[in-house]
Image: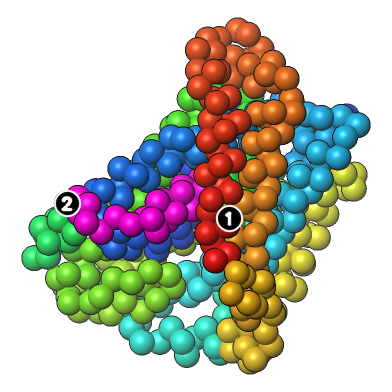
């Protein structure tokens, strides 16, 4: 494909890593990981999580990067090129659909973080406002619109001058903000208690659920099975080492998650707040903590800026999946593709935002082992993608690279067409053939029960 739709690559290796880390580091690291770690056995959970990342997360990342990088095409065409003349491109289509559905609510979430950053910057941050804010009809819509606008302005710049440049600025900034918060955390009275809660291994808290949580979190946190890693993989240069890239991204993602815990728990212990998970932690508990903390004004603002950056770079990566698809498969310019995706995101975003308030009585159903569960649109899209579609997409991807394609496919991908060492091909293939599908199947079934 020539002309204006020629497929580009990241300008530098580091830029590619920054973009992939930007996608990986998101709300999952900040509002989910610390809570699960504290609840599921501290360092015991951490150890199990690291094993899950090694056995499942990294192999799946390598597989998706390889599919993208071998084709240098959008997610659907990348699967098509991997297995021409077959139906495997439907798996790419499924990845695209997951991205498109997540996009529907993720911009709303990003909008909430923008609102909290704004009020914390103006010194107006208060706990206890969350439910009133999200169920309001107009306010969240304004912030969702702003989130989409910011995303679109970055994405219009393209892969190198948009995504890569933004990631190269935002990721170091995120690291700096995180370090400031960690340093502050060390001065709090509850530091020892908070850190102990996170890190002292409590094997007695480890249950079957702990393993399921670790696998699910590894999967979600690394942005596997959403088309993202295929799309970003397609922008990796032909001399980029895929294995090394995946390991760097996974290591940095885990580090950020752990440091987020070091920020959150000591603060909650110091101000006697229960640290739960989900939006409640970020938008209720922590504003209450920052209200009481000396220096709460700059610190609260720093914290919400951090979350905004984490959310924005993840949101960008989700947007890129349909944008690259539209550009290449509909043969339209990047500008148009950004416009179409933004209008779509706005339309669904409005519905998801209203689902938290005015339209909350409108319910959708999902099947489980014990009957149907009803959700508002926001939670429906979240559950539909994470519990049903992503496991299916991931299992099929591991079967494609592990069983259907000749082992030359992965061999070429990890050795950059035999110019580099591929000593880990055998263990990688074993993981992709047996371990990954088995683990994913287990969480898929367990989540339905
Ligand atoms: N990896 C992200 C996280 O940990 C998940 C995600 C990425 C969700 C991109 C949406 C878009 O939060």
What mark, if any, has residue 406 been given in the picture?
none
Q: Quadrant for the N terminus, please.
A: top right
Question: What range is drawn magenta here?
Answer: 199-222
Q: Is residue 359 above or below residue 341?
A: below
What mark, if any, has residue 200 been given in the picture?
2
Find residue 52 and report its horizontal and vertical position in percent. 43, 42
Q: Quadrant for the C terminus, please.
A: bottom right
Residue drawn at (47%, 90%), measured in percent from left and top? 132
Choose the circle earlier in sequence order: 2 or 1.
2
Q: Is residue 42 visible?
A: yes
Which residue of the protein is positioned furthest toward the top in this rendering?
419
Q: Is residue 78 above or below residue 389?
A: above
What mark, if any, has residue 444 been given in the picture?
1
Q: Is residue 439 left or right of residue 274?
A: right
| Residue 185 quadrant | bottom left
Q: Is residue 223 above or below residue 305?
A: above
Q: Is residue 96 left or right of residue 257?
A: right
Residue drawn at (54%, 13%), measured in percent from left and top? 422
Find residue 54 and report its horizontal and vertical position in percent. 43, 35
Residue drawn at (91%, 31%), measured in percent from left and top? 85
């Amino acid at each position: 494909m020539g002309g204006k739709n020629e497929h580009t690559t990241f300008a530098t290796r580091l830029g590619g890593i920054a973009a992939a880390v930007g996608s990986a580091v998101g709300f999952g690291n900040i509002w989910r990981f610390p809570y699960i770690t504290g609840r599921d056995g501290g360092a015991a959970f951490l150890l199990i999580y690291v094993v899950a990342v090694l056995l499942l997360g990294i192999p799946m990342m390598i597989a998706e990067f390889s599919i993208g990088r071998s084709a240098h095409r959008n997610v659907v065409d990348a699967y098509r090129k991997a297995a021409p003349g077959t139906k495997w491109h439907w798996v790419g289509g499924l990845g695209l659909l997951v991205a498109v559905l997540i996009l529907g609510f993720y911009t709303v979430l990003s909008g909430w973080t923008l609102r909290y950053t704004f009020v914390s910057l103006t010194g107006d941050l208060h706990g206890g406002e969350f439910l009133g804010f999200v169920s309001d009809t107009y306010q969240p819509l304004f912030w969702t619109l702003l989130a989409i606008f910011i995303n679109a302005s970055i994405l219009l710049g393209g892969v190198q001058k948009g995504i890569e440049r933004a990631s190269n600025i935002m990721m170091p900034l995120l690291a700096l903000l995180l370090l400031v918060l960690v340093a502050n955390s060390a001065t709090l009275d509850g530091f020892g208690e908070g850190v102990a809660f996170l890190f002292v291994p409590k094997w007695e808290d480890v249950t079957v659920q702990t393993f399921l949580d670790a696998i699910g979190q590894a999967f979600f946190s690394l942005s596997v099975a959403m088309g993202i890693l295929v799309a970003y993989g397609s922008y990796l240069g032909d001399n980029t080492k895929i294995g090394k890239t995946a390991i760097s991204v996974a290591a940095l993602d885990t580090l950020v998650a752990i440091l987020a815990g070091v920020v959150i728990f000591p603060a909650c212990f110091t101000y006697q707040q229960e640290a739960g998970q989900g939006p409640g932690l970020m938008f209720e508990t922590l504003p209450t903590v920052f209200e009481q903390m000396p220096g709460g004004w700059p610190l609260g603002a720093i914290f919400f800026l951090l979350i905004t950056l984490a959310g924005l770079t993840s949101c960008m990566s989700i947007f890129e999946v349909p944008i690259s698809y539209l550009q290449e498969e509909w043969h339209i310019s990047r500008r148009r593709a950004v416009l179409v995706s933004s209008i779509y995101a706005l339309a669904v975003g409005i519905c998801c935002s209203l689902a938290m308030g005015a339209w909350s009585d409108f319910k959708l159903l999902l099947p489980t082992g014990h009957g149907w569960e009803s959700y508002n649109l926001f939670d429906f899209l979240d559950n539909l993608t994470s519990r049903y579609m992503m496991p299916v997409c991931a299992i099929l991807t591991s079967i494609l690279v592990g069983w259907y394609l000749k082992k030359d496919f992965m061999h070429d991908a990890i050795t950059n067409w035999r110019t580099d060492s591929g000593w880990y091909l055998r263990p990688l293939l074993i993981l992709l053939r047996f371990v990954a599908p088995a683990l994913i199947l287990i969480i898929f079934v367990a989540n339905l029960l």
